[in-house]
Amino acid sequence: MTLSGGPETTAPGRYSLIAEDGTRYLVGDLVRRVPGGAVRALLGTPPPPGPGYRLSAYYYSRPDDAGVTGSLVDVPTPLGPMPAWLVPAGDGRRWAVVVHGRGALREEGLRSAPIWAAHGITALYVSYRNDPDGIPSRDGRYGLGSTEWRDVDAAIGYARTHGATEVILMGWSMGGAISFQTLLHGSNRELITGMVLDSPVVDWTDVIRFQATLNRLPRVIGAAAARSLGRRAATRQGPDIAAMDMLRRADEIDVPVLILHSTDDGFVPAEPSARLAELRPELVTTHLFANATHTRIWNDQPERWRRIIDGWLDSTGLGRPGPAATD
């Protein structure tokens, strides 16, 4: 099928194509470029011709699209109940709490659903404050992880009350920063046995400077913005990003961490992910990809992405197969 549009239409890998009414269609690899667009492989039902479509990295829109059975549940949080998808597996003692990125949706994490099911790990795809599915905080602002971790910690508490004795955190983009803060500060942190992070924010200062350079702002502006954000704790003036720098706090990591990051990530640079593995090689493993951009590694290289996570789960002992879930 032929898609017209900008560079997005030529992105490598497989994606969903979303119509204006929300209907999703699946498209595969790039076949060839054409003037003003691209020809891509079609997977499944063809969409009707017309304008108004957009490509999305969210390949699955519901748990059943990913071949798993889930239900919508409410997770109690400090701000009130927030929606989550619960996908039972195994004996119910090992859980994965999946945390999407800033401005993203729970659908972002569904690309990992087949992995958790195969390893007998119950998965919980959560919401947090100020995101499209969450409850607004009083100031209505993202805390870059400095406030959202409380909602993820509450999700771990929900897992605990439903039988979890071990929890793996999976974070995408800012979800990685949230996961790190949950590990450092959560009241349920003793249940966390490992972390899987896709394109994570490890150091916000580096992200801000990177974005300033990308947008051709003077270097001094990026540095000043980073210093300004790092001066104060999470108040009306913003989060203390210096306190969230995991390169400075690498010695506080006490569980195995797997990081997957693309070297051409145009939003969150991969260098801090690589550096963290150098600082804590006994616990942190980083795999770098090329040409996969931000949080689209699965879309571009799904087999390698899954093989790495499967192997890490097996090597750490966190992927022990469990019996099938029962009603």
Image (tube, rainbow, N blue to C red):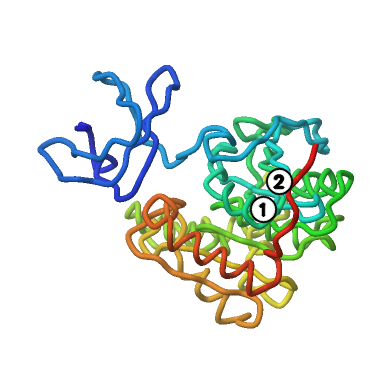
Using the image, determine if residue 37 lies above or below residue 261: above
Mark 1 sits on what residue? 178
Q: Are marks 2 and 1 in contact (CB under 8 Å)?
A: yes
Using the image, determine if residue 16 lies above or below residue 190: above
Secondary structure beneath dot 2 equals loop
Residue closest to the far left: 35
Residue 110 located left or right of residue 160: left
Residue 128 position within the rendered picture, expressed as x and y whole percent measured from the top left:
69, 39
Question: For mark 2, does the 10 Å Cα neighbourhood hold few (<14), some (14 to 19), or many (20 or more) residues?
Answer: many
Secondary structure beneath dot 1 equals helix
Q: Residue at x 67, y 64 (%)?
A: 319
Using the image, determine if residue 225 lies above or below residue 17: below
Residue 110 position within the rendered picture, expressed as x and y whole percent measured from the top left:
56, 43
Residue 175 located left or right of residue 224: right
Residue 301 position within the rendered picture, expressed as x and y whole percent measured from the top left:
39, 57
Q: Residue at x 34, y 51 (%)?
A: 215
Amino acid type at circle 1 is Ile
**Quarter of the rendering containing residue 73:** top right
Q: Nearer the viewer, residue 83 or 322?
A: 322
Dot 2 or dot 1: first in sequence order is: 2
Q: Nearer the viewer, residue 259 or 279?
A: 259
Q: Residue at x 45, y 40 (%)?
A: 59
Mark 2 sits on what residue? 148
